[in-house]
Image: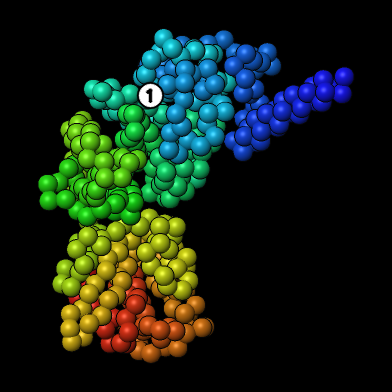
Amino acid sequence: SATGNASIHAQESATACVQAEGSTLLADAGDAPPVSPTAEDSHPSDMSLPPPAAPDSDLTLISAPSVPPSSSIPLPGTKGFQQFFIYQSGGNKAASQSLPAPPAGGAAGAADWQAVKEPLSLVESLSAPGWITRPAVGFAGSGNAFVTESGFRADEAGGQSAALLREFGCTSAVVKRFQSTQRAVVLNLYGFATTDGAFGAYSTMREGASTVVVRGDASSEDDGSISFWRGNYFVKLFTTAEDDEIGKLLATQLADQIAARIDEPARPPCLLSSLPVIDRVAGSERLFMGPLVARRYLAVPFIDELLIDKSRGAVFADYQFPQPQAERMKLLIADYGDASLAGSVYKGYVESLSEVHKLALQAAGSKVFKLKDSYLLCCLRGTRLAVIAGARRKLSPVMLARCLSY
């Protein structure tokens, strides 16, 4: 009948929409193999893989569509990963479906994934009575992205840009979630190749004000988050609910546990000592290792020509001159480790500025340029180059430059 045919056509259209939607999700995930979203056929025959490899620690390969509903809540920074295979640590292994190991030669090499094992060991055993503890998800750094051990890419981990983290030498990221009825606490732990890299990430990605009681080597927090630096790690915890005192209490307890487990104390980068102390705004100190982060804090012309990624690092801070000469300025000091390289960068930078901006003052190894609404000073001293921006009076950056001790 006409009614029956219409019903059949409606069901076929609905099925086609579901299949199309599943295909779209997989397309967004990159080159991942197609996986049907239905429970009856979550592992098609064309997904056959080599025989299982020898077990590696307590890592278990699971297929997200086969995980029970209680374990399928999306994690921050893992958008799209529910459509293909990911490695998870801990959790209810009896409820997870073991699958063959992924093919060798994936995007994450053996050395990269090896760097994830220690960060996983720091958080996988953490639990909270009365909370549902989700398995920890690990990512390894690869180029300007993160990948799972099975080789799938992600442009962020734990809500932080992979490109920014990799600029600091981030080698791994671990995300772990603690779920309650109406709230959640998310733990993000990032591992770095050097302690300076970990400090740089902390200084530019932390939230809140510095705490009086230091957790790790440096810490800060606000009403909904805790950030701290310890050794080669930058750790950030946050609650998903507003004014969540219960979640914040759990975040505090977890932060203390992790800080105690990282037995790698470190000192702030030596380059920070080159920042003048007088008139410096407390808590504004930052460490840059590339242009991506530098652009966030310092809006000056031709910033890419400073070649911060070729330097040993660059420190930054705000300065506030008091009345009657009130001024708010920003100071950047980059150390190139080589006088000839520093001189070459200085020459190229001031030449670019001279093409579009008027020279206001100059001295040996130092020049002040008039920008549209402010003045900019660039000076060279040995292996280091300083840039002072934001001054409304042309003598103000000169006064600040006299305080440089290097």
Q: Position of residue 170 (x, y in %)?
A: 39, 42
Q: Position of residue 330 (x, y in %)?
A: 31, 71
Q: Position of residue 166 (x, y in %)?
A: 43, 46
Residue 117: tell me if it is visible: no
In the image shown, does 323 or 384 lie closer to the viewer?
A: 323
Q: Quadrant of residue 128?
A: top left
Q: Is residue 85 above or below residue 242?
A: above
Relative horizontal placement of residue 169, taking residue 403 as reference (left or right): right
In the image shown, does 222 or 260 lie closer to the viewer?
A: 222
**Residue at 23% from the left image edge and 36% from the top image edge:** 246
Q: Position of residue 25 (x, y in %)?
A: 62, 34
Q: Quadrant of the C terminus?
A: bottom left
Residue 102: tell me if it is visible: yes
- The crowding category of the residue bearing disc 1, from other C-alpha atoms within 10 Å (few below 14, some 14 to 19, many at least 20), is many
Q: Quadrant of residue 42?
A: top right
**Element under disc 1:** loop
**Residue at 16% from the left image edge and 68% from the top image edge:** 277
State how many labels appear: 1
- Mark 1: amino acid: Pro
Q: Quadrant of the N terminus?
A: top right
In the image shown, does 394 or 333 lie closer to the viewer?
A: 394
Relative horizontal placement of residue 11, taking residue 305 as reference (left or right): right
Q: Quadrant of residue 395?
A: bottom left
Among all residues in the image, which is located at the extreme right?
A: 1
**Residue at 38% from the left image edge and 49% from the top image edge:** 168
Q: Is residue 335 above or below residue 259?
A: below
Residue placed under numbered mark 1 in the picture: 135
Relative horizontal placement of residue 244, taking residue 298 as reference (left or right): left
**Residue at 17% from the left image edge and 42% from the top image edge:** 215
